[in-house]
Image (spheres, grey):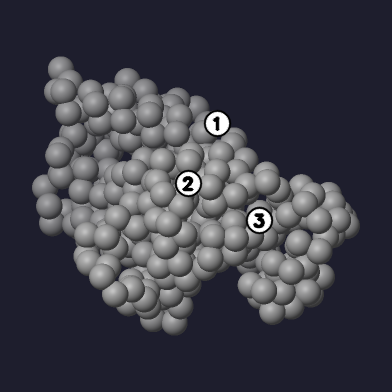
Amino acid sequence: MLTIVELLYDFVISTLVGLFGLHLITKKGPKASKFLGLYFLIFCARIILAYYATGGRLIQYPHLYLVGSPIHFLAPPVAFLFIYFMLYPQRKWRVWQALLFLPFVLHLGELLPFYFGPLEVKMSQIQLVLQYKSLVDYPGTVTFFSPKLLSLLKLIHTSVYAFISFLMVLLQIIKNRNKYNRFVLKWMVTFTSLSLLSVVFIGAYVLGIIGFNNLRFSYADLLMHLAAFVNLGFVLYRPSLLDGVSFQSLVLRLDKGHRSSEPGEDVEKLRKYEGYAKQLESYFANEKPFLDPELSLEKTAKMLQISTKDLSRTTAYIYELGYPDFVNSWRINYIVQQRNSDKHWQEYSQDMLAELSGFGSRQGLHNAVNRLHGTTPAMFFAQKKKES
């Protein structure tokens, strides 16, 4: 009989994570959200398939045997690409990124004859698993490599991606710490660090050091999914970070060490500006008021129910921008995001871009780009296109 923890883990959590993954994949958003959605779907599949491989159910559902094996070569590159596009949201999909999935394709290809083969072959392999009481250390004959060696290859594959991802985040912190929102960096550091820790528990599973390689559910199984659980927690806490426009504006936030306080601004007041900034970002990400050419400091302050003085000081302290420049930065980033995701936007004239993004006029767009980036709109958007 299933315990409450098993019931929640195998059915409730897996279902919610799977639905959330589908939502991220199907909704309009940046590439990072697509890979995170796929990551959650993989997480869901691993939980469900693990349920059918434990508790004596393996022999009842022989057709599901080894179905989850290729997933171990799929999850690491998906997690890596999620981190990659979170750190470099403007970059396009490249051919080399498709090669990351080659181990998954090769392993899936070698298993296809087994999947569509006779039931007797599946049962013979399952009998070996039950005889040796292990999903890792038994004399299987289905794959090119033995189950033990194949498990070690999966471990190495996962470890390499976890280490590279952690190193990539670390290098970005060292080189471009002020470019990214601190919350995003904390998310990436936590995720990659726990990915490395999860590798330790996966290694213990493969090597049989920790005694939960026994065809039964164990609470220690949850340790292998620490990174996935934390990822889910971060997204649920700040879902707006996966909105393309929101992320692009959030990267403009200043690091605390580079913010300039005014005389008389104590810690409580500065903390208050942090809260106002969160409200402001959420409002701009969800409602997109910057698309209104008539948007003013007074309108925004009234909507957020704060004073115009506090709102003006918030944008100056948190972003080192006056309110008009803060709004224009969202408008500019909106154009960049739309041009990257919609080819029609690349053909629009500057007059059309200005109208659709809230500038109202070509001159307004030109003045904003020149003030914030020191160049013309044509040169700025051409450079952004080259970077992507």
Judged from this view, the residue extending furthest toward the bottom is 175
Q: Residue at x 14, y 23 (%)?
A: 3
Amino acid type at circle 1 is Phe
Amino acid type at circle 3 is Arg
- The reply to whether discs 3 and 1 touch (Cβ–Cβ < 8 Å) is no
Quarter of the image where one finds residue 220: top left
Q: Residue at x 77, y 52 (%)?
A: 360
Q: CA distance from mark 1 to mark 2?
A: 63 Å
Which is in the foreground here, disc 1 or disc 2? Answer: 2
Q: Which of marks 1 and 3 precedes in the sequence?
A: 1
| Residue under label 2 | 301
Where is residue 74? Give x, y as percent. 48, 51
Amino acid type at circle 2 is Ala
Is any atom of residue 343 visible in this view?
no
Where is residue 42? Give x, y as percent. 44, 41
Label 2 secondary element: helix
Q: Front-most of 341 and 358?
A: 358
> Which disc is residue 249 wearing?
none
In the visual, does 343 lie left or right of 132? right
Quarter of the figure with the C terminus: bottom right
> Which disc is residue 116 wearing?
1
Q: Front-most of 345 and 327?
A: 327
Q: CA distance from mark 3 to mark 1?
A: 53 Å
Image position of 16 with respect to 287: above or below:
above
Q: Residue at x 16, y 54 (%)?
A: 208
Q: Which of marks 2 and 1 precedes in the sequence?
A: 1
Q: Which of marks 2 and 3 precedes in the sequence?
A: 2
Label 3 secondary element: helix
In the visual, does 267 lie left or right of 41? left
Quarter of the image where one finds residue 51: top left
- The reply to whether discs 1 and 2 touch (Cβ–Cβ < 8 Å) is no
> Which disc is residue 331 wearing?
3
